[in-house]
Amino acid sequence: MPLLEKSVHEAIPGWAYWEEIQALYEYAMKAPDGNFAELGVWAGRTAIPLALAAQDRNSKLFAIDPWESENVTHRHVSWQMNVAHEIFLTNLKTLDLERYVYIITRPGLHAAAEYPLVHLQPLSLVHIDAVDAGWEHFALLTVWWNLLIPGGYMFVHDVKKLPEGMGHESGRPDMGVLRATERWELLSGVKRHGETLGHWIYRKEK
Ligand SMILES: C[S@@+](CC[C@H](N)C(=O)[O-])C[C@H]1O[C@@H](n2cnc3c(N)ncnc32)[C@H](O)[C@@H]1O
């Protein structure tokens, strides 16, 4: 069984806290048989744990990100998108995870249109961390939820206010993401199944 090691994941730049990473990994290990997808990979801080679970379950992670926006400030450092992408690719290679990850270098809505046509395996977990405000985030929730199989899980990041003293830099919640997620809940009638420090978790009923 691959080990999820705190030191390995804290060495990868990104915004997810260890408690969030552990929860993603645990749910990926208990989800029904199927593939996983992540929308918003950046340097892979949450994608690598999902790839480890995919390795253990002999499934695949669809790592979806256009990697094309402007520089991002992280811990007071300005990062170029291509540097974050390179870190992800290097870690996949070093950890021998390449064969468990299928990279789609396009926005999440394009990838959703392609997924059912090309990938016949069912989808059992999706992590949405693309920080797309407003209607695009709402559309991501709608289309990726529809691709999930019964019993599958959807994690939505950046919807919660972090405890005092945490997350000044991350600016959570992202108000556009929060409002669009609440609107999706209202219109779809889907109820929350659980949460982490920064995610709401939904489970598709059987
Ligand atoms: C906050 S970062 C992801 C952080 C990462 N999951 C982590 O834990 O460190 C957001 C990423 O979403 C990507 N992104 C932006 N729009 C997107 C879209 N429409 N579909 C997929 N990814 C998108 C950006 O390129 C960026 O790399």
Image (spheres, rainbow, N blue to C red):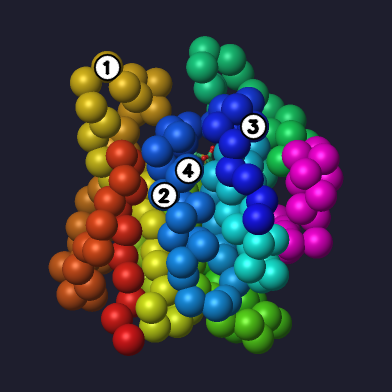
The span shown in magenta is 90-105
Per the image, label 3 sits on a secondary structure element best described as helix
Task: Give the quarter of the image for residue 202.
Answer: bottom left
The amino acid beneath tag 1 is Gly
Mark 1 crowdedness (10 Å alpha carbons): few <14, some 14-19, many ≥20: few
Q: Is mark 4 within 8 Å of ligand 1?
A: yes
Q: Between tags 1 and 3, which lies in front?
A: 3
For the residues labelled 4 and 3, the Cα–Cα distance comes to: 12 Å
The residue where tag 3 is placed is 8
Q: Residue at x 60, y 19 (%)?
A: 78
**Ligand 1 placement by image quarter:** top right
- Compare marks 4 and 1 and give the one earlier in the sequence: 4
Q: Label 3 is placed on what type of residue?
A: Val
Mark 2 and mark 3 in contact? Answer it, CB < 8 Å: no
Question: Quick check: 56 above or below 33?
Answer: above
Residue drawn 39% across and 64% down? 154
The residue beneath circle 4 is 21
Q: Position of residue 124 (x, y in %)?
A: 49, 73
The answer to whether residue 174 is visible is yes
**Residue 135 is drawn in which quadrant?**
bottom left
**Is the Cβ of the residue at disc 2 closer than 8 Å to that at disc 1?**
no
| Cβ–Cβ under 8 Å for marks 4 and 2 | yes
Indicate yes or no whether the magenta region holds residue 99.
Answer: yes
